[in-house]
Amino acid sequence: MTVNNGSTPAVRRIPAAVGHLETFIRLECLRYRVGRILTSVIRIRVYFMNDISGLAAIWIRFQRSPKGSVEYEELFWVVDRMMELCDSEPSAAWNVIQEAVALDQSDEILGMVGAGPFEDLMTNHGAFLIDKVESCARTNPAFRRMLGVVWKSTITDDVWIRLKALAPASW
């Protein structure tokens, strides 16, 4: 583990195989001063690449956590993980998004999914996924509703036209 001067976290990612699941363990050693006592906190976070349901449930829990709360701070890693998936693993990101919509169809979560990871995913991989999006929107009313909060941002014009044809009015 990297020695840390206390100002920034020391982080090391260790890939390991566990059965058929790829597991990523992130060790983060934070050193901070509490009064006169120097305290070390080690947090171990295990990312199961194939645990789509677990990742979606944690993402939802993070979204519902009050900003600044201990839970919010401890679960913030899931935002980074979703961004990684949306950047470099579009199929996995798509599966997590589908699971999040299946787990929680509230306006709050649909809005967060649409304006967050889904928008990022379509910006980065819209051409690759637009056929799946169209198929899903035809059969899943909650998913189709979620499309109403997506902004164009930097989504390509051809993908945006197809998305808007599926989406209900913005809400």
Image (cartoon, grey):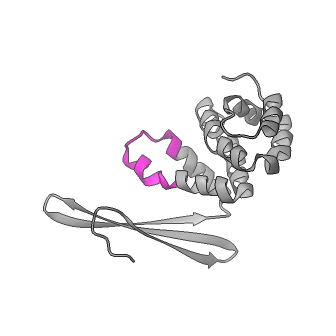
- Count how many numbered circles sit on residues in the image: 0
Q: Quadrant of the C terminus?
A: top right
Please name the residue shown 75% across and 56% down the image: 91
Please name the residue shown 61% across and 65% down the image: 48
Please name the residue shown 34% across and 62% down the image: 8
Residue 28 shows in this picture: yes
Q: Is residue 8 above or below residue 15?
A: above
Q: Quadrant of residue 117?
A: top right
Which residue ends up furthest to the left in the rendered image?
A: 36
Residue 33: within the magenta?
Answer: no
Q: Nearer the viewer, residue 53 or 63?
A: 63
Q: Is residue 73 left or right of residue 101?
A: left
Q: Is residue 10 left or right of residue 130?
A: left
Residue 19 spot, x, y in % from top left: 67, 77
Q: Quadrant of the N terminus?
A: bottom left
Residue 105 spot, x, y in % from top left: 66, 35
Q: Main secondary structure of the magenta part?
A: helix
Residue 118 spot, x, y in % from top left: 68, 43
Please name the residue shown 72% across and 44% down the image: 122
Residue 132 spot, x, y in % from top left: 83, 46
Residue 140 shows in this picture: no
Residue 69: within the magenta?
Answer: yes
**What range is drawn magenta here?**
62-78
Q: Is residue 33 left or right of residue 16?
A: left
Q: Is residue 98 above or below residue 28?
A: above
Q: Nearer the viewer, residue 119 or 29?
A: 119
